[in-house]
Amino acid sequence: MFRYVLKRILIFIPTLFVISLLTFVLSVNVPGDPVEQMLGGGINAAEMGQSSSRLASEKAYIEKRKELGLNLPVFYFSLSSVAEPDTLYRVYKKSHKENLDHLIQMYGNWSQIQAYYHATQNLENAVLELKTDSSNAEAKIGLRDQIFVLYNQSNSSRIQNSLNVISDVFKKTPSIANIYPQYEAVSLAYQDMTTQATTYKNYIPTFHFYGTKNQYHQWVTKFLVGDFGISYQDGRPVKDAVWQATGKTMMISILSIILTYLIAVPIGVWSAKNKNSTSDQIVTTALFILYSLPSFWVATLLITFFGGGDFFEWFPTYGLGNDYDSLLIKAHHLVLPLFCWTYAGLAFVSRQMRGAMINSLSQDYVRTSRAKGVSERMVLWKHAFKNSLLPIITLFASVFPMAISGSIVLEIIFSIPGMGKLAFDVLNARNYPMVYTVVMFSAVVTMLGYLVADICYALVDPRISYSNKKS
Amino acid sequence: MSTVENKQDYWSYVKRQFKKNKRAVFSAWLVTILLLIAIFADFIANEKPLVFKNETGWHFPIIKNYGVQLGIAKWPTDWPSGRWNSNDYDQAFFAPIPYSPNTQDLNNAQYASPFETQDVASIRWRHWLGTEVLGRDILSTMIHGTRIAFMVGLVSMTLATIIGILLGALAGYFGDDRLKFSRATLLWIILLILPTYFYAFQSRMHLWSNAISESFLKFLFQLFVSVLILFGFIFLARTLSIPFKKIPWLQPKVNIPVDIIVQRMIEISVSIPSLFLIIAIVAIAKPSIFLVMAVIGLTSWTEIARFIRAELLKVRSLEYIEAARALGFSQTRIIFKHAIPNAVSPVLIAVAFGIASAILIESFLSFIGIGIPPEVLTWGKLLSLSRSAPWWFAIAPGFAIFLLVTLFNLLGEGLTDAMDPRQKK
């Protein structure tokens, strides 16, 4: 038994490793730039403003990025093509990086692409250095728009078009002729890039090894010592936020599981006892329907009918109340969510209970004990019930993860600040440290659920042994 | 020969048992009807007339539309377009529901209730389930939503079945002791893993991402090319290892514990909270119905793999497989022609339940508004609109989801009962 538990816990390690890799790969590929988001879109705003403020915000951007460790390579090693420089991760803006990636795919000549990128940057700086006056204000805005296009476009006709527009602007506004060479440089660099394409380089692989100075390693080592980082959104430690959310989800899940078993077991026993009677058939059908009802529909209907839609306003439908609210108010908030959390599991468990009871009631020992005059109640609860506990306990393994993943659905609908809602919000906000932690936490909780169920299984049924028996 | 006869016997037995279960038979019929509705949705609810007559003769605009979508026909310029119902035809026959999902009936905008009088010409034009805020007919959206629901269920479970059968069969048939490579082959496989990954996937990444955003067929094609490259490398590894097998040290066979590997894979993907993962993937990528299908399929293969594995572990030591091995049939042939057909029945059950849960997941995703592009109308999306709508709005889409899910669950149950030999009396 002990060895079995140990083995199971050892399996946790590769599983968690894979999950950590998965979440990490996912969050690295999320579109959008967390740094930009943290700075509150200041970068984009500053792009339209003065050069000094733009430089300042750029500096802030680079610093923030360094602080978050996002300037490091992503993983221990990378497999890439010769065309891709191993320094691409140093390009600090995600949108620029993506665009450069596209250009590499198209032309495969990094030195020319780099020259083009630097020329564009030079042009942008030159435009920003210009003193704004009435003669060039309009031209400046036009140039900035086009430079923005150059940064974010890889399509050759679009780039050509925007270069043409820029040259038109120069023709129309002679007062900015002093920065025309910068434009010429961009145009030349673009010509070089397109004419000296080395697309074949995209098909020659190279391998880079970065050592432990990478984002994944930093995150994992910190995670292992319990430092989950700081939430990008509000600067709170991730640990606190996730811990709070887990607490809420666990509370509701456990409450609903207890409720489920309290109601489902008697129903199952009762309908097994009255097997195939009319009332049993009604209950069985009703439970089947309950089981198939999508919880988000039920939740929507409950909110519409009892949450102050067109009908009754009996229950609050938002959140769980404040911390200082009395228990009664909190319970009031819990009624609708708890109902939704419970009903599906209820149907599931009682159907299984009924099946298990019917199975045990048809066993020989039940007949024997009836024959020797044991009271019906004793037969039912002492003999049959005890033996049908087994499938019920294993069900825990599926009820528990069900409650956790069910939390996503219901927490979003009822705005309960638990794990599910947190996961949803955090993903939408691209709050990486939170994403990793929430997914890892829910995986650990799910695995623990399975483990507990397996152990219970072995404890209840002495016939089951987890010694090394080969099938 | 005898196995074939036994198989037929078994299936006719299953059929008989299944027919005894009235609920299951009933749901099989209903599913068929709903499937027909899904297939012929364009002819049941459409703003275009099924057929109309004007000065140039009789025309079939709905059929024509298929041609236009496929790019083999052009939309005639002299036909009425836009507001189909206000045009003067010599004669016209409309679909039973004369509205498309995106037809805006401005006279009945702002949630025209199905229970009150509506501003329509006749009962023929009534919105039987009401309209939403822009005056779009709900019944029409429901009918077209059937199509998405079926598509998601079927496509994602097809994917899951393919993955599940492949991995489950590998694990069950080879177990931990039957797949052996010589050290030379293994060496080449290890050496070629990174280049294979590079050429089959990484260097084609941009092609993949373009294809996914364009169409499902293009995506399938790119997938096919990648798999082809993969097989090319496997072949390369085998060929290259032949001369190296002459070196004594590279000769001994190494055992690959396939079963352990696949079991770990199952364990890992079961421990990942799949809904979290699905939301994570779907939230990252561009909204696409195919992506949703693919992700659901990729997260729900474990059950099928488990069934197949268990069945094959049982089957692989049976006499007829031993006989096939003794006759010198190839491993692939034994697996696919002899072993898997006997493991089909539990897989069918898993697929039925899997379709139910895939439909549920998809409608939940559209309910919370991720993954499904805005122009695709689904039941879940309709349900999500109900939050700011009158009470009757939520009934129909929710009921439709519930109905389809229940029907597939009932089918699954019927199959379970029919295939369970303990039910034999």
Image (cartoon, grey):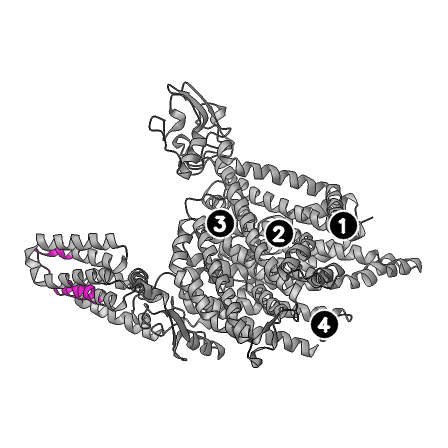
Q: Are marks 1 and 4 on the same chain?
A: no
Residue B351, label in figure: 2
SS at mark 3 in the image: helix
Name the residue carrying label 4. Answer: A470
What's the residue at 57%, 81% (across, down)?
B249
Name the residue carrying label 3. Answer: B367
Measure the alpha-carbon separation of dots 3 and 1.
47 Å
x and y percentages locating residue B18 in the rendered image = 72, 44
Residue A26, label in figure: none
Measure the alpha-carbon separation of dots 2 and 4.
29 Å
Depth check: give the residue in front, B401 or A338: B401
SS at mark 1 in the image: helix
Q: Could you tell whether A347 is left or right of B402 in the image?
A: right
Q: Nearer the viewer, mark 2 or mark 1?
A: 1
Label 4 sits on what residue type?
Lys
Q: Are marks 2 and 1 on the same chain?
A: yes
Q: Nearer the viewer, mark 2 or mark 4?
A: 4
